[in-house]
Image (cartoon, helix red, strand yellow):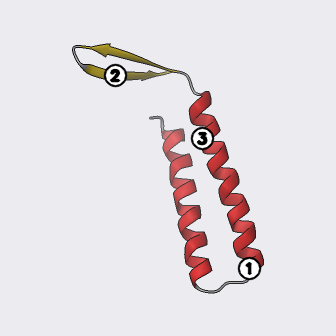
């Protein structure tokens, strides 16, 4: 994985956890809803980037190796 991919995974995870914590503190519904929309946008972007990235899987001697461009 590239550093850029790890950044998107960390951003999505931190955002979802932050929204969950804010919801448990009974923050106003509007802020939680906006945070949820932003979180869903980040997750969709994350999945889109992973599906769009090109990588080759080569099998040799029972091992699977990945090469990212």
Q: Please say if 63 is above or below 33.
A: above
Q: Residue furthest front?
A: 62
Residues at discs 1 and 3 in contact (Cβ within 8 Å): no
Residue to which mark 1 is pinned? 29
Residue to which mark 3 is pinned? 47
Q: CA distance from mark 3 to mark 2?
A: 21 Å
What SS does tag 3 mark?
helix
Question: Badge 3: how crowded within 10 Å, few (<14), some, or many (20+)?
Answer: few
Indicate the position of residue 8 as horizontal and vertical percent values. 56, 47
Where, quadrant-wise, is the N terminus in this rendering?
A: top left
At x 52%, y 49%, the residue is: 9
Indicate the position of residue 60 as horizontal and vertical percent values. 27, 13
Q: Which mark is residue 8?
A: none
Q: CA distance from mark 1 to mark 3?
A: 27 Å
Residue 16: which quarter of the image? bottom right
Indicate the position of residue 61 as horizontal and vertical percent values. 22, 14
Q: Earlier in the sequence, mark 1 or mark 3?
A: 1
Q: CA distance from mark 2 to mark 1?
A: 46 Å
Q: Please say if 44 is above or below 62.
A: below
Q: Residue furthest right?
A: 30
Q: Residue furthest bottom?
A: 26
Q: Is residue 64 left or right of residue 15?
A: left
Q: Earlier in the sequence, mark 2 or mark 1?
A: 1
Residue to which mark 2 is pinned? 65
Residues at discs 3 and 2 in contact (Cβ within 8 Å): no
At x 64%, y 37%, the residue is: 48
Question: Badge 1: how crowded within 10 Å, few (<14), some, or many (20+)?
Answer: few
């Amino acid at each position: 994985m590239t550093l850029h991919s790890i950044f998107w995974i960390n951003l999505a995870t931190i955002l979802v956890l932050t929204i969950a914590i804010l919801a448990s503190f009974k923050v106003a519904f509007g802020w939680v809803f906006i945070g949820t929309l932003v979180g869903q946008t980040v997750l969709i972007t994350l999945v889109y980037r992973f599906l769009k990235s090109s990588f080759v899987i080569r099998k040799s001697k029972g091992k699977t190796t990945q090469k990212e461009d």
